[in-house]
Amino acid sequence: MAPDAPETLWLHAQSQVTIVDLSQCSGLTEERLHELVELGALSPERQDAAQWRFSAECIARVRTAARLSDDLELDTPSLALVLSFLERIANLEEEIRHLHAQLPTPRR
Amino acid sequence: MKYKDYYAALGVQRDASADEIKKAYRKLAQKHHPDVSREKGAEEKFKEIAEAYQTLKDAEKRAAYDQLGSTYQPGQEFRPPPDWEKQFGEGRFEGGQFSFDDLDLSELFESLSRGRRGQQNRANIPIPGEDYEVTVHLSLEDAYRGTQVDLGLQVPEYDDQGRVRHVPRTIKARIPKGATDGQRLRLRGQGGKAMRGGRDGDLYLNIVLHPHSLFRPSGHDLYFDLPLAPWEAALGATVEVPTLAGAVDLKVPPGTAAGRKLRLGKKGLPRPEGGEGDLYAIIQIVNPTVINERERELFGELARASTFNPRGHFTEVKTHGS
């Protein structure tokens, strides 16, 4: 991890990590992570590859990617596709949670 | 040691080809992989499948497994053949004192492949600790205040010879303020212990909030239903409402409609980056189910005096042909 990475890190959009962090926490090579960026499965906050910073949410995504890659023996383009579907599902579930929270539940 | 039927786990015959085993594994893995499946117990199911595949995909391990024979029932206690250790363990389980009794079947085969990497194990190469990933269920109150949880895990432990066994371990994890449903937390160095100067593993927590009797979370915002009597909604009122920080007074403006959301700023869950979510009261207008004579009179009087038509907008609907 980067020397300044805190001991306790919420994996949310406001924290940022480097490609080295992502590689270390997932076991995926930086080369493979570059491919995932090229395929749109990971979006760096800054576009200049030398200064790439990723939202800490990406940590969960690359760890999932590593598991799927190992367990299902997926190549990188298939992996990128699966990750994009998983992200869509996660967003829809978030949306459902949000709608559900606003639904009145009348008392009986 | 308890016997496990790896062929049954993958749903293949004992004489299945390597290709058939691979296909069966892939099919089951796609269905039960915990990152893909939402079915209950997917993780355990996948572990069984993966354990079976780890052994059966490797010709040497499969041959060793096949030597155990097929007469055992799953879960049955058994001892591997007497020459088994010698044949497969020679040069791998150095230090002697190798006992099958307290090993799990998967640990036995895992030891085999670690043993094969014995050369590497003997060198002083640092081995990083394993990362653990755990789902933690929290009450909304604990998420609000921050809390400490005791996590009971079964973790793999390796000795110097690369033998593995799973041992129970309790990890105390401090969860700071900022949690909400579906959020993840990484605690550095609180995963598995490293060997020979490697980096300790990390602990990843997936937060799941228990449903609360009153508040429903959406991100760091919270929603709850605020029932009002018809006259409170019509005339406006100041009502006491609960929040996670204690009760507060909320001013309901006159003419408040059902379904309207009244915001109580910064009364939601604390955000990890600072600040708080909001708390929303969703108005519900409820009628008394039993009314006395006087109330009936007053409602009657209101009905006669009022020109309010709650269904006025129905007239805007054009019927077919009109």
Image: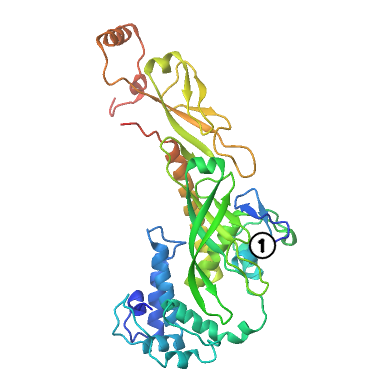
Picture layout, residue B284 above or below residue B45: above
Camera-side residue of A66 and B193: B193
Q: Residue at x 28, y 28 (%)?
A: B321
Camera-side residue of B158 and B228: B158
What is the x, y in percent for residue A48?
73, 58
In the image: residue A73, left or right of residue A6: left
Q: Secondary structure at mark 1?
A: helix
Picture layout, residue B157 above or below residue B16: above
Camera-side residue of B30 and A60: A60
Q: Residue at x 45, y 16 (%)?
A: B255
The amino acid sitting under disc 1 is: Asp
Q: Is residue A74 visible?
A: no
What is the x, y in percent for residue B297?
27, 7
Q: Quadrant of residue A38?
A: bottom right
Q: How many marks?
A: 1
Q: Callout 1: 10 Å neighbours few (<14), some, many (20+)?
A: some
The residue carrying mark 1 is A21
Q: Is residue B313 visible?
A: yes
In which quadrant is the C terminus of chain B drawn? top left
Camera-side residue of B216 and B20: B216
In which quadrant is the N terminus of chain B drawn? bottom left
**Residue ranking furthest to the left:** B293
Structure colour scheme: rainbow
What is the x, y in percent for residue A88?
49, 53
What is the x, y in percent for residue B31?
39, 66
Picture layout, residue B277 above or below residue B198: above
Chain of the residue displaying label 1: A
Q: Quadrant of residue A42?
A: bottom right
Picture layout, residue B121 above or below residue A45: below
**Residue ranking furthest to the right:** A50
Q: Residue at x 42, y 86 (%)?
A: B62
